[in-house]
Image (cartoon, grey):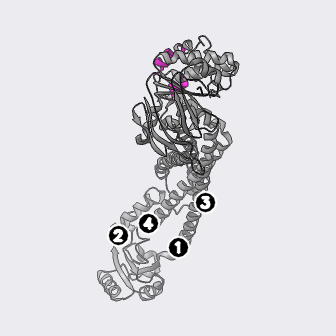
Amino acid sequence: MRAQFVLSEIGVGLRRNLTMTFAVIVSVALSLALFGGSLLMRQQVSTMKGYWYDKVNVSIFLCGKNDVSSDPACVKGAATEDQKKQIKSDLSKMDLVENVQFETADEAYKHYKEQFGGSPVAGSVTADQMQESFRIKLKDPTKYKVISSAFADRAGVQSVQDQRSTLEGLFNLLKIMNYAALGVMILMLVVALLLIVNTVRVSAFSRRRETGIMRLVGASNFYIQMPFIMEAAFAGLLGAGFACVLLVCGQYFLVNNYLVDHVAVIQFIGWDAVLAKLPLVIAIGLLMPAVAAFVALRKYLKV
Amino acid sequence: MIRFDNVSKSYPKQNSPALRDVSLEIEKGEFVFLVGSSGSGKSTFLRLLLREERASHGQVHVLGKDLARLSNWKIPQMRRQLGTIFQDFRLLPNKTVGQNVAFALEVIGKPRGEIRKGVPQVLDLVGLGGKEDRMPGELSGGEQQRVAIARAFVNRPMLLIADEPTGNLDPQTSVGIMKLLDRINRTGTTVIMATHDQQIVDQMRKRVIELEKGRLVRDQSRGVYGYQH
């Protein structure tokens, strides 16, 4: 197949359908940007959840050596081995508790590093400063109070925290936003596909003379269909390119230049996460319109 | 070369079939006129040859192949051995004469060198030497039909199918086109031509096949347009 011939045919086809091509590019760009954005948001949420969020409901933080002076709950000194054993056996006797895990200071440090690895606060923290804790999974997450009242005042316990209460609202909001983004994405995708089908129809009609002659002189089906498919794929590729630009701009302007400065406690996703999504966005932008065009050709182009 | 065995063709939503039980054979190198009034089945006959339609009953063999058994992806290969011309020329108005002919070779993936050599050669053959860069719109009807013939013949097909090629031309121009088709026939190419042009058929004295309401009613070597008793 002669590349120059095919390329010039694509150029002619796209220019003939300039308005339609523009619509395809915009709708593909928006749908893919939303798609990429929703993937990134999901990744952001899992970054924020950290190691324990999905695994436990309640954490009992124990007093460490450093807390004796700073925290009024720990004036009686750091938690002793006996106290830890007592807490553990009491916890395991409770019906409500599904399972209990003990997190040593070293493990706590490791998980902390994983979650906040890149942020400036992480550098100032050492393993000594980390607390030991019991991480508890409840059969009924709403019964947090039972654990709290049983252990909060015990010697050696610094605090009992309901993990979910602090972040659950935010995560629910993000989840809703994510679903909304996906919903709009699907709508835009449907719009893009319908536009492509229509573009192919118009294109096939306006080129029926050429394709008729091609058929007559024995051009292969592939050769006849190729320009249409390439047209759609090319428009899709342009759309995907714009979607990538939108995602990169979002990361640069919204996250790096705004959120990171204004919301210091959260570890945000970095460029690696964004860049990792771009090939997927481009692949979808290229393949989906091509497949749509191919399907549309079955209907609108006799071969 | 071509064989019809009891071929019938009916289209959906039409009561009477377009072809009924047609059997005939056309040998390599023959020149055949296909005559009959409008709606007699001439077009259907040609469409079956090109495998634009499939026969409802019976078998159509073209170039030694049973078209019913030919799988879809092999059809283009089969059509490359056929040349086709029409009453309305079917040229691309935005391409030059040379590009129109070259288009037929480009889309079947012929190498560029072959195209550059073959196009002027075939244009010379049809009497359009030197008009390579003209646009179809600048040419007379007869010249446009010559371009169409050049495009059909550039690939040196075994069989040339002509659907009323002189239908839009004045008698004098038609004679020129017929001479050209005759010359192509003499190179060994089989020519099948559907026509309403009585004068031409009577002059050429070639084999005449007449269809009427889808039936083969006459098959006469060295025949004329109307009945002769």
**What's the residue type where badge 2 is placed?**
Ala
Q: Earlier in the sequence, mark 4 or mark 3?
A: 4
Q: Earlier in the sequence, mark 2 or mark 1?
A: 2
Q: CA distance from mark 4 to mark 3?
A: 29 Å
Q: Which residue is mark 1?
A: A168
**What's the residue type where badge 4 is placed?**
Gly
Residue B3: x %, y % from top left = 44, 33
Q: Earlier in the sequence, mark 2 or mark 4?
A: 4
**What's the residue type where badge 1 is placed?**
Glu
* Dot 1 crowding, Cα within 10 Å, few <14, some 14–19, many 20+: few
Number of the front mark, 1 or 3: 3
Q: CA distance from mark 1 to mark 3?
A: 24 Å
Residue shown at the point (42%, 41%) measured from the top left: B71
> Closer to the camera, B66 or B98?
B66
Number of dots carrying numbers: 4
Q: Is residue A145 above or below residue A222?
A: below
Which label was assigned to residue A31? none
Q: Which residue is mark 2?
A: A105
Residues at badges 2 and 1 in contact (C-beta under 8 Å)?
Answer: no
By secondary structure, the bulk of the magenta-drawn segment is best described as helix
Q: Which residue is mark 4?
A: A50
Query: Could you tell me which secondary element the residue under label 2 belongs to?
Result: helix
The answer for which chain carries disc 3 is A
| Range shown magenta | B102-120
Q: Taking A124 as reference, is A171 left or right?
A: right
Q: Which residue is mark 3?
A: A184
Number of the front mark, 2 or 3: 3
Residue B110 falls inside the magenta stretch: yes
The answer for which chain carries disc 1 is A
Same chain shared by disc 2 and disc 4: yes
Query: Could you tell me which secondary element the residue under label 3 belongs to?
Result: helix
Residues at badges 1 and 3 in contact (C-beta under 8 Å)?
Answer: no
